[in-house]
Image (cartoon, rainbow, N blue to C red):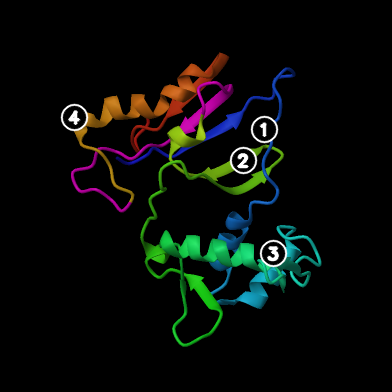
């Protein structure tokens, strides 16, 4: 089943707490780095992650004893390499053949859409006005949260599906209602939901 892209502006009510966004989302920072570069050696990736604050300065070269033998390893580098393997398994990045320690965004992800795995949510970016997240909408939005405005343009029920896929015309209304259910439950009094139904205003 496809998931509707939903953009929500979080309400700034005085009693509502500002959502806490992790500042050490290493996987998200790594994906950003690969998206901004055709290829990245691991040493260049480490520098990028230090520069954007994803890794503490000095952590890359700092070593700690690991295992029974107590051999010194950089825990920061081990964490980055773990995420590399995880992103590779999900088809997001790939090794560059014949280049040791070089990675790039997977070729298929430059043109094709990558479906969000269940229960996986990544932060694209954040500002004082809100947060952009990548993931299935029902994994992102909780019915226990509160929302002031929801603006969404879900996939149309096209006869020929696009790369992001879509449901059939007969399923579309029930499908959209199902995706919006958490937002409706958490909508503040006076809140609004705007759904783009077509390219023609209705």
Say whether residue 35 is left or right of residue 22.
left
Q: What SS does tag 4 mark?
A: helix
Kindly identify which residue carries mark 1. 19
Q: Residue at x 74, y 69 (%)?
A: 60
Check the picture and name the quadrant holding the N terminus.
top left
Cα distance, mark 2 to mark 3?
26 Å
* Circle 3 residue: 76
Mark 1 and mark 2: Cα distance apart in space? 9 Å
- Is 163 situated above or below 101? above
Tell me, yes or no, whether the highlighted magenta stretch contains residue 161.
yes
> Which residue in the structure is indicated by mark 4?
170
Disc 2 packing (10 Å; few <14; some 14–19; many ≥20): some
Between marks 1 and 2 in the image, the one whose residue lies nearer the viewer:
1
Marks 2 and 3: which is nearer the front? 3
Q: Earlier in the sequence, mark 4 or mark 2?
A: 2
Which circle, 4 or 1, is nearer the viewer? 1
Q: What distance separates the C-alpha of mark 3 from that of mark 1?
A: 27 Å
Few, some or many residues within 10 Å of mark 3 (<14, 14–19, 20+): some
């Amino acid at each position: 089943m496809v998931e509707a892209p939903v953009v929500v502006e979080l309400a700034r009510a005085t009693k509502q707490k500002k959502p806490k966004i992790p500042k050490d989302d290493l996987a998200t920072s790594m994906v950003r780095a690969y998206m901004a570069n055709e290829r990245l050696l691991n040493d260049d990736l480490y520098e990028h992650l230090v520069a954007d604050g994803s890794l503490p300065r000095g952590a890359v070269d700092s070593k700690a004893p690991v295992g029974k033998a107590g051999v010194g390893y950089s825990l920061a580098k081990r964490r980055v390499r773990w995420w590399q393997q995880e992103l590779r398994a999900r088809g997001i990045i790939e090794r560059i053949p014949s280049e040791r320690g070089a990675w790039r965004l997977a070729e298929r992800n430059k043109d094709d859409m990558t479906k969000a795995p269940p229960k996986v949510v990544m932060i694209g970016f954040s500002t004082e006005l809100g947060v952009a997240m990548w993931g299935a909408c029902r994994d992102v939005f909780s019915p226990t949260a509160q929302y002031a405005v929801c603006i969404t343009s879900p996939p149309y029920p096209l006869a020929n599906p696009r790369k992001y896929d879509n449901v059939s015309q007969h399923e579309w209304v029930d499908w959209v209602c199902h995706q919006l259910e958490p937002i409706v439950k958490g909508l503040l009094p006076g809140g609004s939901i705007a759904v783009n139904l077509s390219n023609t205003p209705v």
